Every structure is written in structure tokens, then in C-alpha cells.
Image (spheres, rainbow, N blue to C red):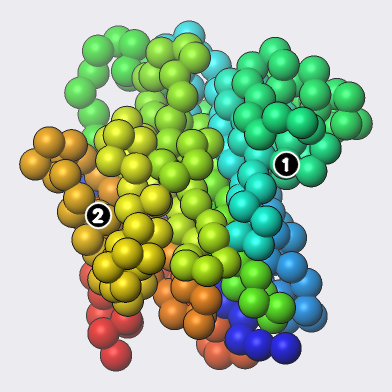
Amino acid sequence: MGKYVIVIHGGAVNTDPSTIPKEKEQKLKQGLEEALQAGWEILSRGGTALDAVESAVQSLENHELFNAGKGGMLNLNGEVETEASIMDGQTLRGGAVSGLKLVKNPVSLARLVMEKCKHSFLTAEGAHEFALSQGLTLLDPSYFKTEEQQEEWLEIIQGAQVEHANKHDTVGAVALDQHGNMAVATSTGGIEGKLRGRVGDSCIYGGGSYANNDVCAASCTGDGEIIMLAAVAHEVYALRKYKELPIREAAREAVAMYADKLAGDRGIIAVDPEGNIAIESNTNVMRCAYRVGEEKPFVAVWKKEVDKHLRK
């Protein structure tokens, strides 16, 4: 049995520090700690990377301070539309879903698509029908809405230019299990004020998520449009595979890839087959956490905390 690692993120964004006061920072860290623990416990007892990333992301989807599942951003119509993907680095199989309005844990539906469906991506009504066929309980749309998100929605439709700490959030996890297998899961409520039917990078293989046992597993967060167009998660893979860069350098280069043409927020977490990790972003906020084996877990909200820790 080998080394095991889990890394999670709860969104990268550039924001005025005043939008995340100390009390909120502590709540965010607590949410990250709980999600990290959920995934780590599975890995520590010899469980699979797939189970670990699903469990960690489920925890974040259930936490209203993160933009995935409950607490997802509202579109211009005042609806929460979620999306998610999961990918198995051993088999290169994946499941993805988008346009969800009634599914409590989008990542779990993505897992069912991967394992129980002949397709690898389902959306909107078809995804809901598949969820029902698999016995998932659908919830009333009111479950997903929080007071904070509804206030932000009102400001957006009224044309207010406001600074929020929650914009562009996404949650994700990458893991390496004791059997040497890797997996990735990514989930989001999208961007604030999006048009109905907008799809982001979180459910796009190679855009917001990618896993391959031979090379790496990577999950992205930030501005979905540019992450898809720059194929950011796959760039981490390509830089590792073809340039043979260390995982941190590959992630750093992927954050900067085509930045002159595709400007915006980007964040990446990644792990390689040896259990080396990367946490990179071009933002001042990078909500994240990781744990390697029995080592002490690390949890952070601010990018400067991450940089200081990883330089040690």
C-alpha cells in the first residue's frame, strides 16, 4: 500500500479582503476542514480515490458558503443551476452533468452517469430523468437558495456594481489512493447573473477537470469561459506528460497559459502519481486544503497563506 493524498478547493477569486471578515474566514475554513476529513478518512482506510473525491465534494455541495449545490449562484431568472463532473484516472472513464435544478449532490449524479449510463454527459431534463431512474431524491428548488445569494441576485438584476467574495466559486477535489489510483471531482453553481442554460468548465473534461493515473489529476476554478477555452486542466496534464515538468511548475504554467488572450481568474489543484501536489492561482483568494498520509492537514483561504506554506 502506497502514499495517499487528497487536495480540495472551494474557489479562487480576486476580491477586496473586506468581503471576507474573520468570522466568515473561520466558517470557510471549517467547511474546508470537514470536506477534507470526509475524503481523507476514506483514503486512510484503504478506500478509493473516486470515493474520496466524491465524498469531499458532497460535503462542500452541502455547505451553503460554497458555490455548489446548496448556496449556488442564481442565474438571471433567479434559479440555481448546477453542474459537476467526476473522472477515474485508472480507467479514463468519467461522468458529467449540467443544467441541474433539483439534484442535492450533482457530483453523485455525475458518478452514476459514469457507472450506470452509456453516455458520459447528461444535461437538464435528461439528467433529472436519469437521476430519478437511479433512485436519487429530487429537492424543491428553494433548498438551494440562500439569503446571501438572493441578495446578490437582486443587486445584479437592479444593475448594481458590487464586490462579492463568492463570485466564480467552484469546489473540487483530487486524490491519490493507497493503490496508486487517482481521481478528480469538480462541482459548481456557476457565475453570478449567468444566463439560463450557461455551462461552465466544471463539467468539461480537460477544461475544469482531468485525471489520468500515468500523469496527474487536476481540478480548476475561476472564470469558466476562459478555463474551457484554454483547456486548463488538460494543459497541466500536457505540460507534465510532454514537457515532463514537476506538477507545481505545470500548474503554474497552466495558470498563465494564453493569459494575454484569455484574461481572468484561474485556480488549479493537482496531484501526480508520486503524491506531489500543486495549488496555484492568479487570485488573492484560493480556498483550499490538503493532507498527505498521516501528516497534519493544511487549510487556507488566502493565496499568500498557501504560497508561504508550500515554500517551506
Is residue 170 or residue 252 the one in the foreground? 252
Residue 18 image point, x, y percent: 24, 50
Q: Residue at x 44, y 80 (%)?
A: 276
- Left/right placement of residue 175 relative to residue 224 reads right
CA neighbours of label 2 inside 10 A, class few (<14), some (14 to 19), many (20+): many
Q: Residue at x 53, y 36 (%)?
A: 203
Residue 105 in view in this figure = no
CA neighbours of label 1 inside 10 A, class few (<14), some (14 to 19), many (20+): many
Residue 294 image point, x, y percent: 62, 90
Residue at the disc numbered 2 = 255
Task: Using the numbered discs, state the Cα–Cα distance from disc 2 to disc 1 in whole angstroms.
Answer: 28 Å
The picture quadrant where one finds residue 229 is top left
Residue 177 in view in this figure = yes
- Is label 2 or label 1 in front? 1
* Total count of labels: 2
Q: Is residue 13 above or below residue 55?
A: above
The kind of residue on which mark 2 rests is Val
CB-based contact (under 8 Å), mark 2 and mark 1: no
Q: Residue at x 44, y 19 (%)?
A: 198
The kind of residue on which mark 1 rests is Met
Residue 10 image point, x, y percent: 46, 53
Q: Is residue 41 above or below residue 232?
A: below
